[in-house]
Amino acid sequence: MNRLSLSHRYERRSVLPSVAAVAVILAVVVANGWSMWHAAPELAPLEPMARLSTLQDAENRGALPENATAMGPTGQPSGARVDAVLGKAQPAVRLTSTKSTPGGQPESTPGITRSVLVEQGESLSQALARLFIHGETARQVVAAYTQLRNPQKLQAGWRLWARFDTAGVMDASGLQTLVVAPVHAEGLTIQRTADGFEVSEGGLPGTVIRTALRCGIIGTLEASLRRCGEGEGLVELLQPMLTDRLLRPIELHTGDELRIVLDKLVDGDHVERYLGVAALEHRSVLQPKDGRTVALNFHGDLYAPDGEGLEPLFLRQPLQVGHQTSNFGIRMHPILHKMKAHFGVDFAASVGTPVYAAGDGHLVSAERSGAAGNVVRLRHDGGYLTEYMHLQRFATSVKPGDSVHKGQVVGFVGSTGLSTGPHLHFGVKHNSKYLDPATLGDVVQPAVATRERASFDAESKALLDLLAALGKGLGDGA
């Protein structure tokens, strides 16, 4: 009996460690699952309204004039950079709920922001699920988004930001704001209202600031800007200005100097996107006394400080990548195999390459047209009409009758119609007669209009002051 009692006691003791081990394993599994659940979205500590409040508060105290510059301890501009015009800082989108205080300043309310990158082939509903936005809230968000965009056509690499007024991952009803941001364009902002959700064009989290930069050229433009602390996004803005947009393109050499006033969207210390180049100054090492070019951006066009136009009225070619394969004039047709007039020029490029409006104008038509395939036609001032043929598809952002600006995407390269492969046929008419698109580069944009001269003079003075604040350089006796 004693041996039996001891045996039972031994068995109970031998079972206890195994039960404890199972409990520990279960605890680890639950903990890991809980951490993976919470780690699915990328937490993004974005507080743009709080940063904006600080800037506005400084501006209201009169501490910073409109053309304020960052000064070093000696009272001179700090280094080669001037972070300026803080009075112009503005939120690109309000990701925090706000309310007015007695002083009139917005006040941030508690909340949490989550963000995810869209994966290949993912729809808006699927991306929302990874942000824990589901059920009726998800349906309302998709319905709002559908008013302006196709929810099935998100692209890999786009980013979604969601702001919740609660930290609970299961409470989709806490969603206040959602931003759908493409890689190289403004996005959409979906905001909760008393009646559900409303959608509006534009939106990226962060604060817009204006910065002046002085950068010496050593090697390539990209390498030089990287040494000066800027990213490749700035190269994408500058390169077309230097080589395509100016009537007399700028060729860079080691020893040259660039001075740039640029607008960028920042979140803390991170640059979300370069928004534009407001002013550009190039100083040539080969001509230190006379080799100086200053281009000021006014309403999207480039002008000299005296208001004269600096760029062709039309782009030299309506796409950034691709090479010309066929000229204007009589040629052997590659498919029909007979001599035939070719009323335009052809550019070979990959399917899906963006096609840009060659100049400001209005969209006349975007339609399928026989051998020309998918065609966009734009009408411009001065009796000009441009044609873009064999497109894969049209840009959904513009419809016939809409205004378009030079450089705006109007379609994408394809091989529709009578075509031997992916390419763009670019044609130009002047007073209903076809002309060689190569001659468009000789048409200069007019000077600043008289009615806009006062506004231009005020803006140009502010930009020139920012450039001058960068200090002496080539040709200044430095």
Image (cartoon, helix red, strand yellow):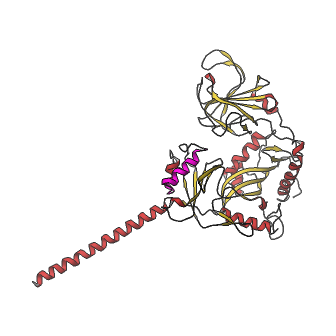
In which quadrant will I find the C terminus?
bottom right
Residue 84 in view here: no
Q: Is residue 422 above or below residue 132?
A: above
Q: Position of residue 210 (x, y in %)?
A: 76, 57
Instruction: Report whether 309 appears left or right of 161.
Output: right
Closer to us: 38 or 68: 38
Q: Position of residue 423 (x, y in %)?
A: 62, 30
Q: Point out the stretch of residues depicted in magenta.
A: 130-147
Residue furthest top in the image: 338
Q: Position of residue 109 (x, y in %)?
A: 62, 67
Residue at (87%, 40%) from the top-left corner? 447
Closer to us: 367 or 373: 367
Residue at (50%, 53%) from the top-left corner? 136
In which quadrant will I find the N terminus?
bottom left
Q: Is residue 243 above or below residue 110?
A: above
Residue 393 in which image quadrant: top right
Q: For the image shown, how many numbered marks are present on the structure?
A: 0
Instruction: Report whether 316 appears left or right of 116.
Output: right
Asked if residue 134 is among those painted magenta in the image, a careful observer would answer yes
